[in-house]
Amino acid sequence: MKVRRWLSSLLRRHSWLPATAMLLMAAVFVAVPLLRLHLFWLLSAGAAFGLASFVCGYSAHARKSTNFPFLGHLHRRRYAEVWDSLAASPWRARSAACGQHEEDALRRSAERPVRNILELTGLGPEDEVLEIGCGVGRIGLELAPRCRSWTGVDISANMLTVASERLSSLNNVRLLKLAQVGLRDFEAKTCDVIYSTNMFDHLDEMDRWLYVEDAFRVLRPGGRLFIDNTDLESDAGWAPFARGASSPVQIESPPYTPKPATSTEYATYACRAGFERIQVHQRSPLLILTAIKPNSAT
């Protein structure tokens, strides 16, 4: 398994290797009979050519596969390094965002979270909107035309490069790379809606809290918060968690492995930050936190 991961990673980083090997082996295979070399060398060249063909085919599979590098050497909270590694190429960035790298599939994958955000935040044409962990702009591309302005922040420069290309046709969009966890780069009371989807799963619990706390400061009075996470209390959310716990080989999980949460955890964050009208909607396999900043908040 380790050899397979290493080979896949090598071929993804150096995609020119299989083609080069094929050309070299083809040259040898042609040269041997022309130079009237020994039968042993002819058979050896044939075997090498077959091996090169296999490697070339395997490399194509490795490049198309949605399996990601293990990244066991990176701590979970080294977010920039983790997600820049997962987004090492544009199609890898797309796959890391939702498991799909084709544009049509990427846009279809956004339909459900967009419906949830529109329904539960009431996002409208006068709202100034901020997405935490915007990735490749999967959701931003759909929501930006529906609001006054849309800002996407992410800690991965590679993700933002793809987002910039995908959102280039929109004139009300801003992208910002975060230097650290939190929204310290934003002034207080400058946004009407802050949301995050398919991102808090990958955060440490303390960093989840920091983003919620900062969101309260950045939202205007009456501003709305939306965050989703895999729901540990649902059957669909519990199943992968239980499978991991019962694995016969207990190894450290990759740093990007989603971490499910409970409704109590998210309700606690919102309450401690000062939000009101706190609700946790359970839409398997997700829990969705919605909350509103009080009009009286400073």
Image: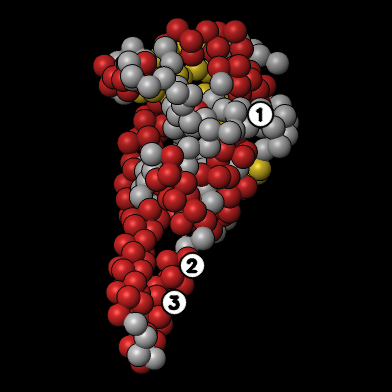
| Residue 43 x %, y % | 30, 74
Q: Quadrant of the N terminus?
A: top left
Residue at left 41%, top 82%?
A: 27
SS under mark 2: helix
Pointer 2: residues within 10 angstroms few (<14), some, or many (20+)?
Answer: few
Give the camera-side residue of 168 and 224: 168
Packing grade of label 3 (10 A; few <14, some 14-19, many >=20) is: some
Place residue 232 in its image quadrant: top left
Q: Nearer the viewer, mark 2 or mark 3?
A: 3
Q: Nearer the viewer, residue 200 or 74?
A: 74
| 180 relative to 202 in the view: left or right | right
Between circles 3 and 1, the one closer to the viewer is 3
Query: Where is 52 relative to 154, above or below?
Result: below
User: Please, what is the three-letter code of the amino acid marked with disc 3?
Assistant: Leu
Q: Residue at x 39, y 75 (%)?
A: 25
The residue carrying mark 2 is: 16
Q: Are marks 2 and 1 in contact (CB under 8 Å)?
A: no
Q: Are marks 3 and 1 in contact (CB under 8 Å)?
A: no
Asked whether the beta carbons under mark 2 and mark 3 sit within 8 Å of each other, the answer is: no
The residue drawn where x is 35% and y is 90% is 36
Q: Nearer the viewer, residue 284 or 52?
A: 52
Residue denoted by label 3: 24
Residue 169 place in picture, x, y as percent: 52, 60
Q: Mark 2 or mark 3: name the one nearer the start of the chain.
A: 2
Q: Is residue 58 visible?
A: yes
Residue 258 in the image: x percent, y percent? 44, 27
